[in-house]
Structures are given as C-alpha cells and as structure tokens.
Image (cartoon, rainbow, N blue to C red):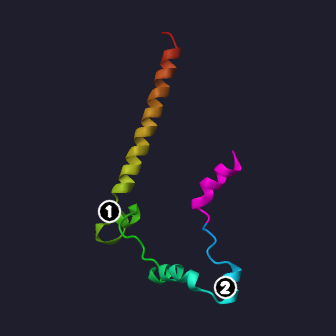
Amino acid sequence: MHASLVRRQLGGLVPPKVATPSILSSGQGAGLAPLVQFYSKLPKGSASAPAGFSIKARYFNGKNASGKPLVALLLGMATIGYTIDYNTHLKHHKNRAH
C-alpha cells in the first residue's frame, strides 16, 4: 500500500492538530474559541447505560425474567447434534453395501 493511501484511510481516526505550542504559550487563544465552545456543549458526567438492548436485560432481569433463551439454546444444540448424528449415520450406510 502507498503511504498516501494509508494516510488518507487513517485520517478519520487521528484527530487534527488544533493547538500548537506557539499559540498556547503566546496567549493567543482566539483560534481555540470554536474548539472550546464545542467541548463546552458536550454532556458531562458518566454515560447512562443502554437499557433493554441485551439479552440479559430483556430476559433475565426485572419482571420479564424467563428461561426462554436457555430452552432455545438447549433445543438448538439438540437439533444441531441430531443433524450431525443423522448425517454421519447416512454416510455410514452409504459406504457399506448390504
């Protein structure tokens, strides 16, 4: 890969250089006013946890607690096991002539 292609792809991941040491040390902070306004509008404090999006929150916590995911898991495993067993049984009979 070419260096310019990599630089272009990673351009969105690496933040641009906004504050240079000369601007900060000379006291000219007028260029940083839009950046300060942007960060002052961001919410402060800890982020709230998303509610109800996980399987645990949907089926195991609160008044909706049930064992449906466990039953579905067991039935799925039994179905996959039966399918594998059935296919190996057919291969066994296919290779044996009676």
Amino acid under disc 1? Ser
Q: Is residue 95 above or below residue 19?
A: above
Image coords of residue 9 (percent x, y): 60, 53
Segment tinted magenta in the rendering = 1-14
* Residue 2 sits inside the magenta stretch: yes
Between 33 and 96, the one lying in front of the other is: 33
Q: Which residue is mark 2?
A: 24
Q: How many marks?
A: 2
Amino acid under disc 2? Leu
Q: Is residue 34 above or below residue 4?
A: below
Marks 2/1: CA–CA distance: 59 Å
Q: Which mark is residue 4?
A: none
Image coords of residue 62 (percent x, y): 32, 72
Identity of the residue drawn at 70% across and 87% down: 25
Residue ranking furthest to the bottom: 27
- Secondary structure under tag 2 reads helix
Image coords of residue 32 (percent x, y): 57, 81
Q: Is residue 41 above or below residue 83?
A: below
